[in-house]
């Protein structure tokens, strides 16, 4: 599994940053609507067999409102709108989890939401978005979805809530990193899943500012490694073909702010296969008693796979970022992982 040369793009880091005071203020402003999710050690017979007596701490963001970290960025984005913008409502494009988060944020702020969701979205996520009061418009693919959202912005003057790009998004997810650094201040390294970089950009920034000696490593699916490619190229990149079970980590591009913060504060990116993700899901179920979606197991997949020897003896933090999946799909992926564990 390839990783980028950590010096290859050193001169190409965009001049973007987040202020620690602004991160703390964001946490205070959103505290009433969001949860300070707990941390817990990961231990058990399977973990010990695979890693020995590893020192692993999980940040259990799957217990966040809406079931994923995305509520943090979406709520912060909606709350920063002007009263005039709120009166006109919001829109978003999503393969699932961002639709749920945007719908939740709109309900919390008392604004209307017309959200475009891809036809391939997990049905559990679509149902959850509707339960928060959003009107969902179904698009056959991502490109059509963005065109539909653009029409809502143009024709209805709705505000577009981006799934991973922008200061409001990264400040929102930085509150997760702030919490983790406060809850586990002796971490040696944090592993965080990467899609478009909305989660990783905020987490990496906050952790590195609060715990300067702590390393932050991003983890991407092999079939959707657009951030790794961006690191190697020294600028945001696009992928035309994506293939991974971790659909919430599979945007077709990176964008300047999320990329810039990730490039500045993350040490590097490693990639994991779908088999490794399923195997990690099975470990989570056996030892942590957690039923997580693929993205939620991706950080553990890296610890069990490409980073196992490198991080032996380190106090390692894992962001368990979400758990929105229907039972049938989860059962299939869990069974795949169990077979791999027992092979």
Image (cartoon, grey):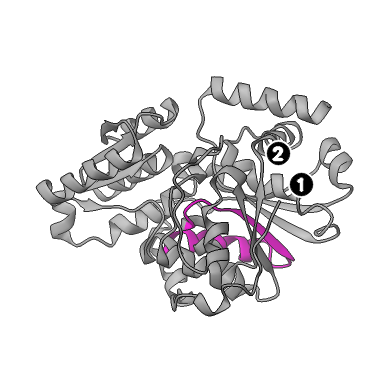
Q: Which mark is residue 305?
A: 1
Position of 108 with respect to 150 (left or right) is right
Label 2 CA crowd tier, 10 Å (few <14, some 14–19, many 20+): many
Position of 164 with respect to 199 (left or right) is left
Give the percent coordinates (x, y) of residue 341.
79, 30
Along the line of sight, the residue nearer the viewer: 69 or 12: 12
Residue, disc 2? 276
Along the line of sight, the residue nearer the viewer: 147 or 314: 147
Position of 70 with respect to 89 (left or right) is right
> Circle 1 — which element?
loop
**Residue 270 vertical position relative to residue 340 in the rendered view, above or below:** below
Give the percent coordinates (x, y) of residue 308.
81, 52
Give the percent coordinates (x, y) of residue 130.
31, 31
Farthest residue to the top: give it. Answer: 328
Give the percent coordinates (x, y) of residue 336.
69, 25
CB under 8 Å between discs 2 and 1: yes
**Residue 245 vertical position relative to residue 182 in the rendered view, above or below:** above
Which residues are the magenta region? Answer: 171-197
Q: How many marks?
A: 2
For the point 55% across and 24% down, which residue is it? Answer: 329
């Amino acid at each position: 599994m390839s990783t980028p040369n950590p010096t290859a793009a050193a001169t190409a880091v965009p001049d973007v940053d987040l202020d620690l005071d602004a991160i703390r203020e964001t946490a205070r402003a959103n505290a009433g609507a969001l949860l300070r999710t707990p941390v817990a050690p990961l231990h058990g017979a399977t973990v010990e067999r695979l890693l020995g007596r590893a020192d692993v701490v999980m940040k259990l963001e799957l217990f966040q409102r809406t079931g994923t970290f995305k509520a943090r960025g979406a709520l912060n984005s909606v709350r920063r709108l002007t009263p005039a913008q709120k009166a006109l409502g919001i829109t978003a494009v999503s393969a699932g989890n961002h639709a749920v988060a945007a719908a939740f944020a709109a309900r919390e702020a008392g604004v209307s939401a017309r959200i475009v969701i891809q036809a391939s979205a997990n049905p559990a996520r679509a149902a959850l978005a509707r339960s928060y009061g959003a009107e969902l418009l179904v698009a056959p693919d991502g490109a059509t979805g963005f065109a539909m959202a653009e029409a809502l912005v143009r024709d209805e003057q709705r505000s577009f809530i981006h799934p991973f790009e922008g200061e409001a998004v990264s400040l929102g997810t930085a509150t997760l990193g702030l919490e983790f650094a406060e809850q586990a201040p002796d971490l040696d390294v944090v592993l965080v899943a990467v899609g478009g970089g909305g989660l990783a950009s905020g987490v990496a920034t906050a952790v590195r500012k609060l715990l300067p000696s702590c390393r932050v490593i991003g983890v991407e699916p092999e079939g959707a490694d657009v951030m790794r490619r961006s690191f190697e190229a020294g600028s945001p990149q696009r992928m035309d073909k994506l293939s991974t079970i971790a659909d919430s980590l599979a945007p077709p591009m990176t964008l300047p702010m999320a990329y810039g913060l990730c490039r500045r504060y993350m040490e590097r990116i490693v990639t994991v296969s779908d088999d490794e993700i399923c195997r990690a899901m099975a470990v989570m179920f056996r030892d942590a008693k957690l039923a997580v979606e693929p993205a939620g197991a991706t950080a553990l997949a890296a610890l069990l796979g490409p980073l196992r020897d490198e991080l032996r003896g380190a106090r390692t933090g894992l962001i368990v970022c979400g758990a929105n999946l229907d039972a049938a799909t989860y059962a299939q992926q869990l069974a795949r992982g169990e077979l791999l564990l027992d092979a």
